[in-house]
Amino acid sequence: MSFRNLSPLQMFQRLAETRARSCAFAAENRAEWSQWKADTLPRVMACLGDWPERVPLNPLFLAEWEHDGLLKQKWLIDVQDGLAATLILAIPSDLAKGERRPAILCWHGHGPYGKEPVMGNNSSPELRAAIAAHNYNYGHQMAKAGFVTFAIDWIGCGERNDTQKPNHYTPQSRDWCNLYYLHATMLGMTTLAINVAHGMAATDFALGLPFVDPARLGVMGLSGGGTMALWSALCDERIKATEVICYSDLWAHFGFRDMNYCGMQVAPGLFRLVDLPEAQGLLCPRPLLVDIGANDTCFKVDTAMACFRQVAHIYDVAEAADNLELDLHAGEHGWGGNRSVAFFERHLAATPPAR
């Protein structure tokens, strides 16, 4: 008996390392890439299951204040039947009357504060520490650079955390990401699709504002927010440019080996089709900026770079290498911020008027 494996974890790890993916990228030219994407993307989307139905947003204005030279607003919107979300807007102070600016949806990562540090809330020592640890206030910084930025909490975080006010449920030390995933899959849904749908509702609201150019939309996010940035862009063609921050790796390593994932990042059967580099590569030829921390302890630099090299290969084969950028920074698990402003300025530039 001692010569046989009794570890279920080792069994799963071996399956992850050895099972072939049915949509693994093998194209050698642009035509083959195009066919691969046409065949693969619908199958990947099908893994998300059923989506919540869209509902009227019924926006409710809550508050407006000035912070560090920015105008900030808080709104409440309906994102599906029976569920709402609070939304934070950061608006540049130099916005001229009648001007329309590009907008960036800023997804947060895991943590107790949701969108708050991303959008620059530094009102407590804890929030300031979160910002300092991950250079986490990219929603605030990108608004300072001239973009309109906006954010909501994904389910289970921030103001939509069932253990925090105004909710008071206690999951007995269980992870809400995993509990919601179990609930969702029982209903034929996934938390990924639910969160992406809520992000699309937030985008509907933002793009309807008079000072936002609906033709110039980007998305960015750190860690779990990188997951959300990737899937938001895959599911919403309105997004013209994407920044995935510290969410590059290989599923067999960061998922099955390190168990560095949760229910909000996965969909049934996804790994039978593609690995994470191929999922990112499905964004091609749309512009993609990837941030990798050389000292990241969540997504180790060796497998993170292996992921990026595979994405780069997809962009090369598709003859779209100019639309892929890398910010390999010296930091830990956080936003590099070295290329973001120039990247979004380049790809969300105003379209010259037709002559």
Image: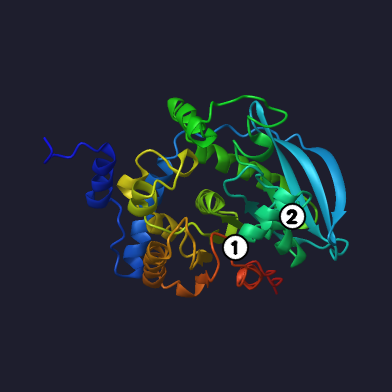
Image point (48%, 68%), residue name: 294
Q: In the figure, is residue 142 to the left or right of 25?
A: right
Name the disc covering residue 120, or none.
Answer: 2
Q: In the figure, is residue 156 to the left or right of 1?
A: right
- Quadrant occupied by the N terminus: top left
Task: Write down the quadrant of residue 200 in the picture.
Answer: top right
- Quadrant occupied by the C terminus: bottom right
Q: Position of residue 269 (x, y in %)?
A: 34, 40
Name the disc covering residue 335, or none.
Answer: 1
Q: Position of residue 199 (x, y in %)?
A: 62, 44
Q: Position of residue 157 (x, y in %)?
A: 62, 39
Q: In the figure, is residue 150 to the left or right of 310?
A: right
Which residue is the extreme one toward the front? 2
Q: Is disc 2 surrounded by few (<14), some (14 to 19) or many (20+) residues within 10 Å?
A: many
Q: Is disc 1 surrounded by few (<14), some (14 to 19) or many (20+) residues within 10 Å?
A: many
Image point (80%, 57%), residue name: 91
User: What secondary structure is marked by label 1?
Assistant: loop
Task: Write down the quadrant of residue 168 in the picture.
Answer: top right
- Examine the rendered structure and indicate whether residue 163 appears above or below residue 89: above
Q: Earlier in the sequence, mark 1 or mark 2?
A: 2
Q: In the figure, is residue 311 to the left or right of 125?
A: left
Name the disc covering residue 200, or none.
Answer: none
User: What secondary structure is marked by label 2?
Assistant: loop
Q: Position of residue 82 (x, y in %)?
A: 65, 26
